[in-house]
Image (cartoon, rainbow, N blue to C red):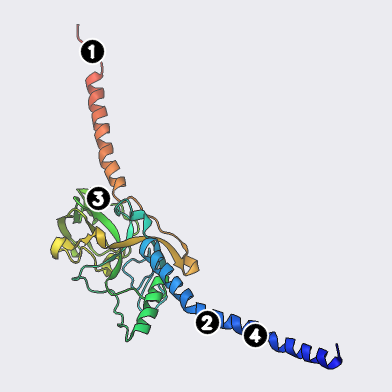
Amino acid sequence: MSDERKSKSRLWHRRRKPRPKQDTRRSLLRELPILLVVAFVLALLVKTFLAQAFFIPSGSMEQTLHGCTGCTGDRLLVTKPPYWFSDPQPGDIVVFKGPDTWSPEVETEPASNWFTGALTWLGRTVGVAPPADDDFVKRVIAVGGQTVQCCDAEGRVTVDGNSLDEPYIFEPKPPQSRAFGPVTVPEGRLFVMGDHRSASSDSSIHINDRYGGTIAVDDVIGKASLIVWPLSRFGWLDSPDIQQAQADAATSRIPVGLGLAVSALTLPTQRNE
């Protein structure tokens, strides 16, 4: 092969090399919309059935959950499988859709167009945007069939006559200013309250609403399970059995009383002869 032909061959190969890169770029551009759609569908499925992040916008759950207008509130992981086969229990922290009569704890601007709406939805999915106006986070106090009231002689909420053990309460109101009830919770509904009793718009505030301020179990989005941000507050959230401790204390008095009575009856008696 002559030098001229070799030179032309090298030049031809050099011109051919960039084509695969161009083809790859075109392929990526064609596949990008498909990848975005797949990612959107996966995010929607995860949010609908498994878990989603949630942004705490207010201080109604202080100091368990931190949040305030304009500050860096806690970001939660809200899980849904815990309520696949059972209902929320007293002590659980739940995120739910509030009744129409409940005022939002934080005002959000409506999306001006579909693009900003999509960004807002994505931000709420990953927990970097404030929740919707009708999303709330509170603690379950009583469930269907139970009667809740405030307050006992020590200013505590009672359920079915038993005082609750609530060590998480922050800045409680004076008992005379937060008295309510008694209210019997309808079946399929929950009585919920914020841990920051002096700054929470919850069931106790809406006691005169239909259903006594309770929320529907079907409106519960999921269970607040984990604080994921900020890292300094990272950790699992407890669900204390707030009713069981007092119920155990109440029932424990019965065996003691019975034991004393039985002992008195079975003690040998001394007869005078």
The amino acid sitting under disc 4 is Arg
Tell whether 89 sits left or right of 127. Answer: left
Residue located at (43% from left, 74% from top): 37
Residue 272: percent from left, percent from top: 19, 9
Could you say whether the residue bearing mark 1 is in a helix, strand or loop? loop
Residue 214 visible somewhere in the drawing? yes
| Front position among marks 2 and 1 | 2
Label 3 crowd (10 A; few <14 / some 14-19 / many >=20):
many
Residue 77: x %, y % from top left = 41, 64
Q: Tell me if label 2 and label 3 are in contact, CB under 8 Å.
A: no
Tag 1: residue type? Gln
Q: Label 4, label 2: how many angstroms apart (C-alpha)?
A: 15 Å
| Residue at figure coordinates x 36%, y 54% from the top left | 82
> Which residue is tagged 1?
270
| Quadrant placement of the N terminus | bottom right
| Label 3 sits on residue | 163
Mark sitting earlier along the chain (3/4): 4
Residue wearing tag 4: 19
Q: To which quarter of the image does residue 203 belong?
A: bottom left
